[in-house]
Amino acid sequence: MLSKTKFAPAVDRTVGAQTSTGAVMEAIRLKQATRALAPGEKLPSIRGLAANMQVSPSTVIEAYDRLAAEGLIHARAGSGFYVSGAVPSRALLEAEPPRDRAIDPLWVSRQSLDARPEMLKPGCGWLPADWMPNAALRRAIRRLARADDAVLTDYGGTRGSPALRHILVRQFAQGGIEAGVDQVLLTASGTQAIDLVCRLLLHPGDTVLVDDPCYFNFQALLATHRVRVVGVPYTPTGPDLSLFAEALSAHHPRLYVTNSALHNPTGATLSPQTAHRLLTMAAAHDLTIVEDTSSPISSPSPPRVWPPSTAFSA
């Protein structure tokens, strides 16, 4: 059954800290709580509700996605969004403190993968498709398709392709890092690499320093390891050194996880002077630095500020 419920325009886009997305969500919650929207009822189309409430379609898309994540509505393939089963009363909805999903790192991480293609994804750190070497990738895939059957179907070694590890070792040597092929472990992503480091070095309750702001996946990953996360404000040349020193003394962290070059989301690059002082403080406090840097892959001459063999690099 298609809903004939009317929605008022979201004229005030920022009621308190509420965004236009929050206004759309609150309007739908109110209609459900007052039974103006019944279970099983079809919600207005994205464009229809956007026009009705005078917001952008992308705002309605995000609102529907968040409400679906909360279980209040659900999508039916090729049909639209529908009100889910029993809806709590307004009093019950207000009994629980409101949760700001915008700062839930696990929710943000899921949204970065599950959001519709037309939605912007700031902070994900992914290069646009038209920036990538697509022609070279297609050639490599065609070449791989002609390889022996074993290459296509068998499992690889636990450390990854020996040929690729040899290439990486040569690249490391050019940057002054001495490493053997057996010291290189290939992973499916930088996040998996950091997860392995966390499994090796962390225990629940340990403290980890991150930049503030930092790549949202760091927050999500560290939450799964049940560690305490302490943010240090980030400046154009790296973390605020005085506050970093205070955090070391106050919290005795086990790790510091960072992007040193092309920092996400600020775009800054750690200065050599800041890097030197950080390394000095890290050595004095037995702090392990974990560097997540994609620039060696995406840049022909990537900036590198850490001296060789001073940090894990993912």
Image: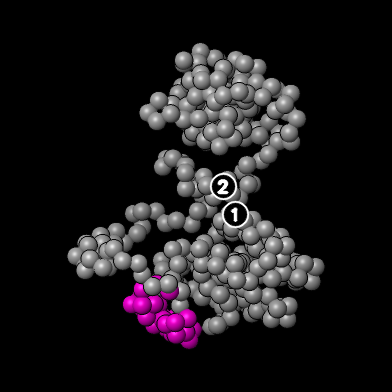
**Pointers 2 and 1 in contact (CB under 8 A)?**
yes
**Amino acid at the residue labelled 1:** Ala
| Location of residue 67 in the rendering, given as x and y in whole percent from the top left corner | 57, 32
User: To which residue does mark 2 refer?
Assistant: 108
In the image, is 242 to the left or to the right of 70?
right
Other-residue count near label 2 (Cα within 10 Å), few / some / many at <14 / 14–19 / ≥20: many
Can you tell which quarter of the image residue 47 is in? top left
Q: CA distance from mark 2 to mark 1?
A: 8 Å
Residue 70: x and y in percent read: 59, 35
Quick check: 233 left or right of 220? right
Does 218 sit above or below residue 65?
Answer: below
> To which residue does mark 1 refer?
220
Element carrying mark 1: helix
SS class of the residue under badge 2? helix
Q: Main secondary structure of the magenta part?
A: helix
Q: Bounds of the magenta span?
A: 159-183
Image coordinates for residue 109, horizontal then vertical, percent: 54, 50
Give the residue type that dot 2 points to. Val
Closest to the camera, between mark 2 and mark 1, is 1
Query: Percent position (x, y) of residue 99?
Result: 68, 39
Kindly identify the residue that appears in the image at 65 percent across and 17 percent down: 34
| Residue drawn at x 50%, y 63% as measured from the top left | 192
Q: Is residue 95 visible?
A: yes
Residue at 50% across, 16% down: 3
Residue at left 75%, top 30%? 95
Q: Extreme top residue here?
A: 4
